Image (spheres, grey):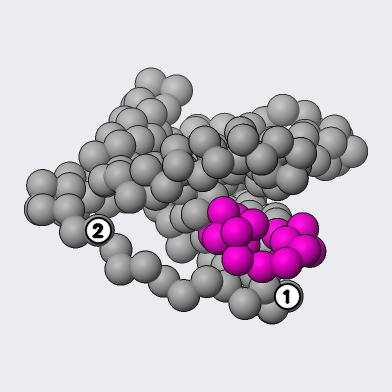
Amino acid sequence: MGISPTLIAVTLRVLTKIPRPNRPIGFMLVGLTAGSTALLLVLQIVDPRNFEALLKHDVEGVLVRRGVDLTAGALFFIASVFMWIRARTPHRPRAPKRPPTGSPWEMVLIGALNAVVSVSGVATMYLTARLIRGASDNDILRVAGYAIFVLALVSPYVLLAWVWERFPRVSGRLSAFFGRLAAADLRPAEAALTSLVGVIFLGLGLWG
């Protein structure tokens, strides 16, 4: 969730085009965290325990839990079919976009949209929601677990900004590497990840 080629490309453009880049990068991470948190809260609606709390019989609870996993698996598997079809078409490099202005609202929006509009982001946050809900019934421990997730979420961009400022030679090599990554055709990898998530949830629904 924290290694997005799109946000890495935005971060590099901010580092190279905007004076004092730490502030706009910070706003982008605020948006990324806010978008991920909002998605996590929305996904609590489909958490099996919320359905089970409304039911009195264990058998019905099992059916609901399996139904949620089977539905999630089917949706991700169907999405992966379309992604595999799209991955077979010729890859067209994206036209260069204008550099971000560094406006706080623009950077917050960039971070938030990157969290909520990607299939891989939804899949990751669904897994995160399940792990946090299943780890403990203690709300303090759940919040602590999510805090660790947020640290992992923002750390690649904080580290990139720090390395960029402290080590100019390394930053040049990182810029070249991430430039190639941003231009690469990642559609097969995205389709494979979505297929894997679909298979996992279908397996949980059938045998979990």
Horizontal arrangement in the rendering, residue 75 relative to residue 38 (left or right): left
Q: Is residue 27 above or below residue 184?
A: below
Among the two numbered marks 1 and 2 on one chain, the one whose residue lies closer to the N terminus: 2
Q: Residue at x 26, y 45 (%)?
A: 185
Is 22 in the magenta? Answer: yes
Q: Is residue 76 above or below residue 107?
A: above
**Residue 163, position in %: x, y?**
70, 38
**Label 2 environment density (alpha carbons within 10 Å; few <14, some 14–19, many ≥20):** few
Q: Which residues are magenta?
A: 10-25
Q: Which residue is mark 1?
A: 104
Tell me, yes or no, whether the highlighted magenta stretch contains residue 111: no
Q: Which residue is mark 2?
A: 93
Badge 2 marks a residue whose secondary structure is loop
Among the 4 quarters of the image, the one containing residue 136: top right
Residue 16 in view in this figure: yes
Going by the numbered disc 1, the residue's amino acid type is Pro
Residue 12 drawn at (x, y percent): 57, 54
Which one is in front, 107 or 9? 9
Query: Which residue occupies 72% across, 61% down?
Result: 21
- Report the front residue among 158 and 112: 158
Instruction: Provide the secondary structure element on which disc 1 rests.
Output: helix
Residue at left offset 39%, top offset 42%: 181
